[in-house]
Image (tube, rainbow, N blue to C red):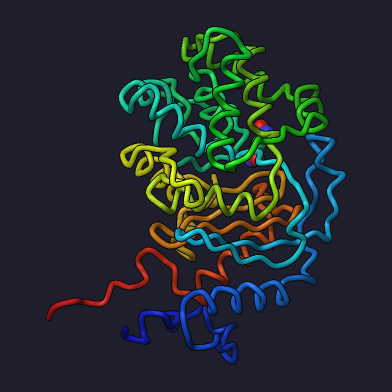
Amino acid sequence: MNPSHNAPIPGELDSSFRGVSLPDGDAEVRILAAINEIHLRHRNNHEGELPTYIPELANADPHDFAISVVTTNGHTYNVGSIDRRFTLQSIANPFVYGLVLDLLGRERVLQSVGVEPTGNPFSAIVLDRKTNRPMNPMVNAGAIAIASMIPGATPTDRLNRLLALFACLLDEKPIVNMQVFISEKSTGDRNRSIAYLMRNFKMLEANIDETLDLYFQQCSVSVTAPQLALMAATLANGGVQPRSGREVYSRRSLRDVLTIMLTCGLYESSGTWVHRVGIPAKSGVGGGFMAVVPGRMGIAVYSPKLDQHGTSVRGQRACEDLATLLNLHVFGNTEARQR
Ligand code: GLN
């Protein structure tokens, strides 16, 4: 293999890594060396703030910091506080979007939720001016609309459908953090406003309280970093859970999920992220951060202090460094194959 394929492209991003050399050898040794190096590098970075608008999230331990990678052949690499649980929050959005795409089909979903990035924060009370659709399924408005489309005769049926999805992704029974659920439900007036605005425009037909409960429940699914990396690995592995071999998403829906993560996953900083790092990613105010390297690996970072956009500070930095060290940018290997 041409060694330049593994080397970071020269430039601004990797200048800080001069002097760090990963061991030669197979990709797996390099992954473990890289995450250890990155954990060491960022572990004393205490920038950012804990979120307070969902009061329970402010109780997180700001020192926690975990990095996990699960490759598409199912190997796991971990460093840091990997037993600590955190809630998915918006990281649930791409997973539920994929579920609804598979169940209802792309055309039906497109009628209700757009695919345009927004320059607005995730909780913006904004709909597309022409179509009245939420801009995309990664922001709260879009995620609430998607939750309202989960089929089922009763709220329990719909919750069971959601939990069955997470059970497939995790290959074990999912846990919903009830404290976080109650905390968000009792303070969630902004999301309630978004839901009423959508109903006003006839963009949300389901019962509002039931829809918000379901949305708050998906946000409150609680995972560890290795579990989140496994979930991301299913998105990296053509929609097939790498441990169980079970197909969770069709290829067609998966393509849409990854595309929207790439363009909209970090809300109003999505453009900067894709420019700098170039892999589909999703953040959540619970401090989790997930990225997907199609065909190769799922990446998860947990660190609860957030930047002004609601994204984990160390989550982004660690993931960016990993992408640099392992040359993961989707357009990072574009040298001509033929001259
Ligand atoms: N549950 C959170 C909310 O609705 C999710 C936001 C996020 O993770 N960005 O505000």
> Residue drawn at (41%, 21%), measured in percent from left and top?
112
Across and down, in percent, residue 295 comes to 38, 59
Residue in the foreground of this view, choosing between 247 and 298: 247
Image vertical order of residue 332 relative to residue 305, above or below: below
Residue in the foreground of this view, choosing between 15 and 23: 23
Image vertical order of residue 71 relative to residue 55, above or below: below
> Residue drawn at (42%, 66%), measured in percent from left and top?
329
Q: Looking at the figure, which quarter contains the N terminus?
A: bottom left
Q: Is residue 141 left or right of residue 102?
A: right
> Residue drawn at (41%, 44%), measured in percent from left and top?
239
Q: Is residue 156 left or right of residue 116?
A: right
Name, please, the residue furthest toward the front: 244
Across and down, in percent, residue 3 comes to 37, 87
The image shows a total of numbered marks equal to 0
Across and down, in percent, residue 74 comes to 51, 58
Q: Is residue 195 left or right of residue 251?
A: right
> Residue drawn at (54%, 60%), measured in percent from left and top?
70
Q: Residue 36 is drawn in which quadrant? A: bottom right
Residue in the foreground of this view, choosing between 197 and 305: 305
| Ligand 1 sits in quadrant | top right
Name, please, the residue furthest toward the left: 339
Q: Residue 307 is drawn in which quadrant? A: bottom right
Image vertical order of residue 280 relative to residue 213, above or below: below
Q: Looking at the figure, which quarter contains the C terminus?
A: bottom left
Q: Is residue 56 left or right of residue 239?
A: right
Across and down, in percent, residue 288 comes to 67, 50
Image vertical order of residue 116 relative to residue 313, above or below: above
